Image (spheres, rainbow, N blue to C red):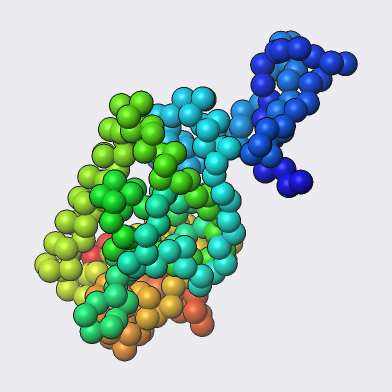
Amino acid sequence: MCVHNLLILPDAKVVNGTNLKYDNCHTFYITLPNKYTPFMSKCEQCIVREFSSLKALNKEELLKIANCKSSYTIKKGEPIFEEGENVNGIFCIKDGVCKLSKLSANGKDQIVKLVSKGELLGQRSMISDEPVNLSAVALEDMEVCFIPKSEIMGFFNQNNTFSMNVMKSICGDLKEADDHMVNMAQKTVKERLAATLLYLQDSYGTNEDGSLKTQLSREEIGSMIGTATESCIRLLSDFNKNGLIELKGKKIFLKDIHGLKRESN
């Protein structure tokens, strides 16, 4: 038998100080005397709950999620889901970063945004009852949980705060999409590159050696800023010559933050 979860429940009948039992979901329940403080389930402690719409769920609802969720390790380069797929649930990112991209009419992969730990994937398609319109691919090894649509949609009818949080999250995504469209239309490629490099450092940090922690290929950076790979390589080389950045193989170091900010405006 495979044990998926370990949950501590409040006082009940205790045999020799501890009462053990398990249910059909292969979840062990340990009942302790009242003098002990119950541990939180993993879903209560999870970073995804802290930063996403799941923070509106109560303990009983989180317990339901803990009993039905599936946990996965996604290796770098592997898809979480692909454009046109029926996901039928949401993915919670516990650790790692992935790219959301869309295949254009000319067959090129356009990166729409990056998503990291604490965020959810699949909310919009779950509510609209449509296949996902983007692909999600891991940029590094990731830990994700999947919660079935059947469980999540039940919370919509029972928890108004949760419903509102999901709607706010989707509205935030739409606002980001609007801002991205404006930037693509009004900023030059050089400005977009400078802004993207600053975004990568501000949002995802640096390694111990000072290089950008989220390592994207030149092709992926070009996709983010809407230009050909060759143009991206040429601009990065120009930034390097001007002392704004330093290039060491695939690694990128930001050397002149103020200069990059000037270039991004």
Q: Position of residue 2 (x, y in %)?
A: 73, 47
Residue in the image at 29% along x and 51% along y: 129
Q: How many marks?
A: 0
Q: Quadrant of residue 259?
A: bottom left
Q: Quadrant of residue 245?
A: bottom left
Residue in the image at 72% along x and 32% along y: 22
Q: Position of residue 88 (x, y in %)?
A: 40, 52
Which of 147/174 is in front?
147
Say whether residue 195 is left or right of residue 205.
left
Residue 243 visible somewhere in the drawing: no
> Is 35 situated above or below 63?
above
Residue in the image at 58% along x and 51% along y: 71
Say whether residue 251 is left or right of residue 229.
right
Residue 81 visible somewhere in the drawing: yes
Which of 91/232 is in front?
91
Q: Position of residue 219 (x, y in %)?
A: 37, 81
Quadrant position of the C terminus in the picture: bottom left
Say whether residue 152 is left or right of residue 178.
right
Say whether residue 265 is left or right of residue 67.
left
The residue sitting at the right extreme is 16
Residue in the image at 29% along x and 63% along y: 133
Which of 83/76 is in front?
83
